[in-house]
Amino acid sequence: MKKQLFIVTILMAFCIGFAGCAFKNDYMPVDPSDPYSAPRLVIRGTVSNEDGEALVEIRVSENITGLDEPEVMSYNYAITDAAGEYTIIRYRGRILPTEVVLSATDPNGTYQSAELGAPVTYDTIMTHDGLEPYNGFVTADFVLKRK
């Protein structure tokens, strides 16, 4: 019995170890029509004042042209944390924007609102049609001025 258990354990370890290894040119094909492999648009950045101090509770929102969506926290807007950082993660959908327009607003009214356009970069996936852009990434840092 111990010998059989030992053999099964060794075989399982070998299978798991082998399955976890990938060759350099291997890829996992992704079907963009699969709802579980939908591309994302990840927007990150910081908000600070002119003295370089992180600003807390600043609202940063994005609006992709042509989309009429309800506001959802962390999907199309975010509030900065104690370090002045924010992250918005949303589905990219079928569009491939080259730029995202973002706005930063201080709900307390101490700082002026600001708007900026930030470029989008993409990673790629291998599909049956070849390499295609997939997830979009944006980094946008704001410096707000006092009113």
Image (cartoon, rainbow, N blue to C red):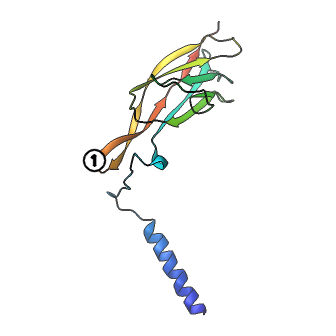
User: Against 24, is 62 above or below?
Assistant: above
User: Against 121, is 3 above or below?
Assistant: below
The total of numbered circles placed on residues is 1
Q: Quadrant of the C terminus?
A: top right
Residue furthest toward the right? 108
On the picture, is 71 further left or further right than 92?
right
Q: Which residue is mark 1?
A: 129
Percent of width and height locating residue 79: 65, 27
Q: Residue at x 63, y 31 (%)?
A: 73
On the picture, is 66 further left or further right than 72?
left
Q: Residue at x 57, y 33 (%)?
A: 75
Percent of width and height locating residue 61: 57, 23
Percent of width and height locating residue 94: 40, 35
User: Against 114, is 8 above or below?
Assistant: below
Q: Nearer the viewer, residue 93 or 130?
A: 93
Q: Residue at x 39, y 45 (%)?
A: 32
Q: Residues within 10 Å of mark 1 (few under 14, many from 20)?
A: few
Q: Secondary structure at mark 1?
A: loop
Q: Quadrant of the N terminus?
A: bottom right
Residue furthest toward the left? 129
Q: Nearer the viewer, residue 30 or 16?
A: 30
Q: Amino acid at mark 1?
A: Asp
Q: Quadrant of residue 144?
A: top right
Percent of width and height locating residue 24: 34, 58
Q: Quadrant of residue 19?
A: bottom left
